[in-house]
Image: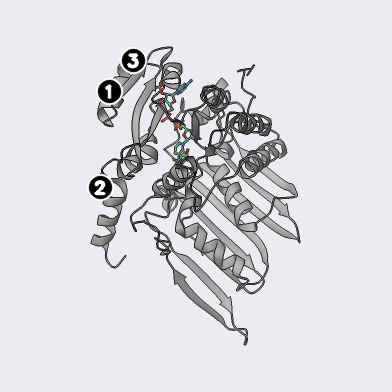
Amino acid sequence: MSSFLSWVKHVRTALNPPGSPEVTSPLRFGILGTAKICRIALVSPASNHPETVVYAIASRDEQRAKEHAEKWGIGKSYGGPHGYQSLIDDPNVDVVYVPLPNGLHFEWTMKALSAGKHVLVEKPICDTADEARQMFELAERKGVVLMEGFHYRFHPAIQRAKAILDSGELGPIKNLSASMSLPKGMNKTGDNRNNFTLGGGATMDIGCYAIGCIRHLASSEPTAVLSATSTRHAKPTPDEELIDVCTRATLSFPNDVTGTIYADLEKPGWGPFGLIPSMADGGVIVKCERGELNLNNFFMPFFYHSITVRVEDVNGKIKERVEKAYTFGDGRKEEESWTTFRHQLDAYVDKVKGRTPKTWIYKEDSIGNITWIENVYEKTGLGSRPKSEYTFL
Ligand SMILES: NC(=O)C1=CN([C@@H]2O[C@H](COP(=O)(O)OP(=O)(O)OC[C@H]3O[C@@H](n4cnc5c(N)ncnc54)[C@H](OP(=O)(O)O)[C@@H]3O)[C@@H](O)[C@H]2O)C=CC1
Ligand SMILES: O=C1OC[C@@H](O)[C@H](O)[C@H]1O
């Protein structure tokens, strides 16, 4: 990005992409709930995708369903206590998007899959690995597509970082360290993130990215959680008792590789008395035998990012270069301003339409991630988030 003004334009286009004319048989998405993330994660990307339309939205509240349908330009709304099920039962809905609190992912994904719908479910896939396995088993039985929305994995930035590591240029990996934090002040009492029953906690909410990122870049599953410590609310409400506000963990990987994660819903400010708010963080640093790679924003790289590579040359001198990757440049249709979610939607549509997606989050990956989230929680002493009370018969 050559100047501040062109960066502002880039961000504006990313968040408000131009509309695309629909093709004759678009995939029709239905949204469960009125989560804030819907606009950036699905509504905007779908408006720019030539083969998708957001056809319906459902809310527990009739008025809220109508308001959000109007606000987001969605033609159909379902509200009230049967709103979610009515959307699922609508024969015009092809794909159900599930951006509900984590603890409800299992129930509503299972209900949508049962009705023969494809599902795009928000991260983390659900509360337990056992439930994740059941979700994929049902999707396979029904012959429909189920994917966890780890959007960052679809962006060129993380893929370029992985390609550099996989090329061997920096030698074998020794340590990976991923941070995901939100500035203090954003985390409010009553938020789903602070509700144990709804699958809250820092490790679930943002630690899932950090764990996923180091597993992905290491190209292997961890072997153990070596240490994990959490800080909790000073004066927790009953919902907050087992909530981790911040978790730090170290995991071991094969070949003496270690990985650390830092997930903080309330990153303290800095400067005098901590009065200067911290920035949200979503970076990863990988130390290797012959150098180091630092991707400073793997999480939302479409806003900005850089991949700093420091590598030792044959004389032992360190050379540094900085790369950016806003496109794949492989001839596919893409724009520099595409968000992680727009890339993700492209892959999702390809999969449902029987084409080969460039990137995919496979079931083993999703089950692996929630397994290690549970293992981290076990080590902290807080324990896994509760299993859903919903029983699938
Ligand atoms: N990919 C990303 O970058 C992001 C992903 N997420 C993920 O999206 C999901 C939702 O995120 P979150 O921030 O919690 O969403 P919000 O708090 O914005 O919204 C959740 C929605 O779920 C519905 N809902 C149904 N039952 C409940 C309940 N018992 N309590 C609260 N809400 C309920 C509500 O819709 P209604 O009442 O209208 O039916 C509500 O609007 C999570 O899995 C989260 O991890 C969140 C933010 C960013
Ligand atoms: O996935 C997420 O990304 C953005 C964060 O603000 C949020 O807590 C998390 O759910």
Q: What residue type is disc 1 on? A: Glu
Image location of residue 289, percent across then percent down: 67, 71
- Residue assigned mark 2: 18
Instruction: For ligand 1, tell me if the residue under mark 1 lies within 8 Å.
Output: no
Q: Is residue 359 above or below residue 144?
A: below
Given residues 238 and 60, the one toward you in this image is 60
Q: How many residues crowd mark 2 within 10 Å: few (<14), some (14–19), many (20+)?
A: few
- Residue assigned mark 3: 62
Count of picture labels: 3
**Residue at x 32%, y 65% (from the top left corner):** 1
Q: Is residue 370 left or right of residue 20?
A: right
Name the quadrant containing residue 195.
top right
Distance (Cα) linking label 1 and label 3:
9 Å
- Residue assigned mark 1: 67
Q: What residue type is disc 2 on? A: Pro
Number of the label disc, if any, that sits on residue 17 = none
Given residues 373 and 237, the one toward you in this image is 373
Q: What residue type is disc 3 on? A: Glu
